[in-house]
Every structure is written in C-alpha cells, then in structure tokens.
Image (cartoon, grey):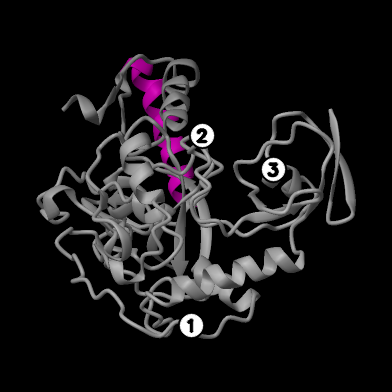
Amino acid sequence: MIEVTIDGKSIEVESGITILEASRKLGIDIPTFCLDDNMEPQGLCRICVVEIKGFSKLFTSCSTVIDRPMEIFTESENVVESRKMLLDLLLSNHDFDCVNCQKSGACKLQEYCLRYNIEKTSFNGRKNTYKIDDSNEFYLSNQNKCILCKKCVKMCSEIQCTSAITESDRGFITRINTPMSCGLKESTCVSCGNCVAVCPVGALVPKYQPYRHWEVSKVKTTCTYCGVGCQLNLIVKDSKVVGVESNPKGPNKGLLCVKGRFSYNFINHRDRLKKPLVKINGKFEEFTWDAALTFIKNRITYIREKNGADSIGILSSARCTNEENYLLQKFARVVLGTNNIDHCARL
C-alpha cells in the first residue's frame, strides 16, 4: 500500500493502480475522453492530465501508475489551463451545433466546455467538412463532430474484432474512416453499435432517436434475443421504449449485438398483446392477470386429476430468459409431475 495525497486528501492505495483510479476512490472527478473500462488506457486525449509535485510536466492520470508516495493536484492552475487549451483546439475544428445535436445533454465535450467556461474557440480558420456517412441502416457517422479520441476504432478492432473502421490520413485531415473509404455499408461492419455506445460526442449516433437525453428514464433489463443474457437499459419516454443503451455494469460490460441494441421496435407494435386472452365459448376475451392465472390453475388441476399429469403439455419460448425457462421446466416436472415440456426453438 502507498499513501498519496490528491487535492489535499490522503488515501492509501495499492501499488500499480492509476492516478485516475485513486482519484475516483476519493470521489474526485477527472475529465476523460478516450478512456473506456473495457480497453487499456491510451492517454491520447490529454484531457485527464494532472500535476504531480516535483515535476514540471503534466501526467495523464489514466495511464500513470502510482509506484511511490505522491502529492497530486487535479485542478491546479497549470492543469486547468492545459484543459482549456485542449478544449479550445477541439472546438476550432468542430461542428459546434449543440441545439440540433442528438448527443446534446450527454456529450462530454459539451459538458467539459461548460465546466471550464469555454463558449467558443479562439482559433479561427479552416475547418474540415466531411460528408455524413448514413449508409448504415442503424446509425450514422458525422466526422465533423469527431474529436479523434479513437475509442470507436479500438472498440471495433480490439473488443468487437471486426475492424470495420480505422484512422485514415495524417495531420489536420486525420479522421475516422472505413478501409479504402468504402463507407459503412460496404465495410465489414456488423451494426453492433458498440462504437456508437463509446463515442463521447455526436460523431456516431443512432439514426432514429426521437428524444432528448433529459426527457427519458432508463430501465435495466435482460436481452432475450439469445441465451447469453446481456444486460441493457431500455430508454423510456411517455411509457414507450424509444431506444436501448449499454449497461456497462452488466456481465457483458455494455457490449451488445445488432439485435439487442437496435431491434426493439416490436415492443411498441400495435398488434402486441397487452392483456391475457382466455378463450370462452370459442372466442378470446381479455382477462386480468389474476383472473387468467386463476383460470389456468383451475383448468390444470381439473385436467391432471381427471386424466393424469401426462395429459398436460407445456411449450416454452426462446424469448424468455434462461432463468425463466429453467423455472418453467421445474414447474412442469416437479410441480405438475410431467416431462411433456418442449421449446419453440426446436421448430
């Protein structure tokens, strides 16, 4: 254990953890652009720099490990000046249209500009004007808003292992691009949207987003498209699901496939059943859940007593979770006493 002091607060930490991790233990918020918990720290964006007593240069807190006692300052005059200059430079080549940006309210560049009172750039000159790539069915790429943190590239190549996007050109015209500039539709992109999830600004956003980030609530749930059981957040507005968001605290660490992230519209389909239906005299009628469950209980009890447990069959669903299907087969075999249970995926 090593004792360090961060902004006047002392703490003992394990040798080898980063300054950023130690700061978070103290509840100190250090800005980050390029950092993601699924990837090794890059130290590319430089917004997370801090000052260490005894050194003239600034250190990136995300990649600097604590290996000896240190006195660290996260908001010193030099640190704040460095962050302001970085934000100023980013804005000099940025489409600064927050009013119409889908990311407004959840954009880290917007957040940090407000935090450090940066209203506009002091570097007036040429700006890159790239054509927006909207060839993908689910999301679009607007490189006029990119800050070149490269999280999307690392996500696609190192975590998703698709390598559909990369960094092209050098210097002022550096940008995130597809190999050979073929466009997202012709690339190897599998539309998982994990690059969209990690983008800190509005460079990669879903195509269909009928909400602002302050208008919605989020509900944690389990994706039921397959047996992996990925955790995700449903984005809800006016009692309707209007989007899906990664849940980085889930065992899938926020990673989703194209179905889990983008195929949610069926939830709001007009033909979806909203109440149990029970057939009475050959016609389906709406029941409350309590009434429907009581009806099922009475019918199953009657059938089992009259014809035996093997006269009952249960058909399960691939759209249930693993846990729900496990409980259903236990219900069939233990409670009802029948092995007549099957699964719709066998069809």
| Residue 21 marker | 3
Q: Position of residue 343 (x, y in %)?
A: 27, 26
In this orientation, does residue 224 appear?
Answer: yes
Label 3: how many Cα within 10 Å (few below 14, some 14–19, many 20+): some
Query: What distance separates the C-alpha of mark 3 from that of mark 1?
Result: 31 Å
Mark 3 against mark 1, which lies toward the viewer?
1
Quadrant containing the N terminus in the rendered view = top right
Q: Which amino acid type is marked by label 2?
A: Pro
Between 1 and 171, the one nearer to me in the picture: 171
The residue that appears at 21% across and 70% down in the rendered structure is 132
Query: What distance separates the C-alpha of mark 2 from that of mark 1?
Result: 41 Å
Q: Position of residue 242 (x, y in %)?
A: 37, 66
The residue that appears at 45% across and 62% down in the rendered structure is 235
Residue 296 against residue 332 in the figure, above or below: below
**Secondary element at tag 2:** loop
The residue beneath circle 1 is 121
Q: Position of residue 206 (x, y in %)?
A: 31, 63
Q: Which residues are magenta?
A: 290-310
The residue that appears at 25% across and 40% down in the rendered structure is 163
Residue 296 against residue 131 in the figure, above or below: above
What secondary structure is the magenta-colored segment mainly? Answer: helix
Assess whether mark 3 and mark 2 are in contact (beta carbons under 8 angstroms). no
Q: Which amino acid type is marked by label 3?
A: Glu
Between 65 and 339, the one nearer to me in the picture: 65
The residue beneath circle 2 is 251
Between 199 and 138, the one nearer to me in the picture: 199
**Secondary element at tag 1:** loop
Residue 131 left/right relative to 146? left
Label 1: how many Cα within 10 Å (few below 14, some 14–19, many 20+): some
Residue 126 left/right relative to 237? left
The residue that appears at 18% across and 66% down in the rendered structure is 134
Mark 2 against mark 3, which lies toward the viewer?
3
